[in-house]
Image (cartoon, rainbow, N blue to C red):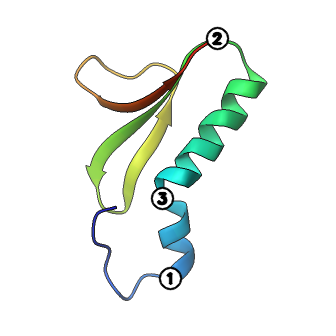
Amino acid sequence: MPALSPDLSSKRYILCSRENAHRVASRLFDAQSGRVSIVRTGNPLQPFCVSTSPSRDAHVEVEIVS
């Protein structure tokens, strides 16, 4: 994970983790049919996001498909 500022809360570290992004993606996948992707953003405050339609140039880390 990218280095975060030491003055950020410990909860921010949990929210920014790839593991948390995977939990969110799994829940979204269970709630709907279709593809769900975990995308690396390059933003240290939100290094990963979950998307159902990432752009072609997105840096997809994981895809969950049915």
In this view, the mark in front (1 or 3): 3
Separation of marks 1 and 3 at Cα, in angstroms: 13 Å
Marks 2,3: beta carbons within 8 A: no
Residue 4 at x, y percent in the picture: 32, 74
Q: Secondary structure at mark 2?
A: loop
In this view, the mark in front (1 or 2): 2
Within 10 angstroms of label 1, few (less than 14), some, or many (20 or more) residues? few
Image-based side of 1 in relation to 20, left or right = left
Q: Inspect the image, locate mark 1, and give the three-letter code of the amino acid beneath it.
A: Ser
Q: Which residue is mark 1?
A: 9
Q: Inspect the image, locate mark 3, and give the three-letter code of the amino acid beneath it.
A: Ser
30 above or below 20?
above
Q: Which residue is mark 2?
A: 66
Q: Residue at x 63, y 43 (%)?
A: 24
Which numbered disc, 1 or 3, marks the residue that appears first in the sequence? 1
Q: Residue at x 38, y 36 (%)?
A: 39
Within 10 angstroms of label 2, few (less than 14), some, or many (20 or more) residues? few
Separation of marks 2 and 3 at Cα, in angstroms: 24 Å
25 above or below 7?
above
Which numbered disc, 1 or 2, marks the residue that appears first in the sequence? 1
Residue 12 at x, y percent in the picture: 50, 71
Q: Secondary structure at mark 1?
A: loop
Which numbered disc, 2 or 3, marks the residue that appears first in the sequence? 3
Residue 17 is labelled as: 3
Q: Residue at x 38, y 88 (%)?
A: 7
Q: Inspect the image, locate mark 2, and give the three-letter code of the amino acid beneath it.
A: Ser
Residue 26 at x, y percent in the picture: 66, 35
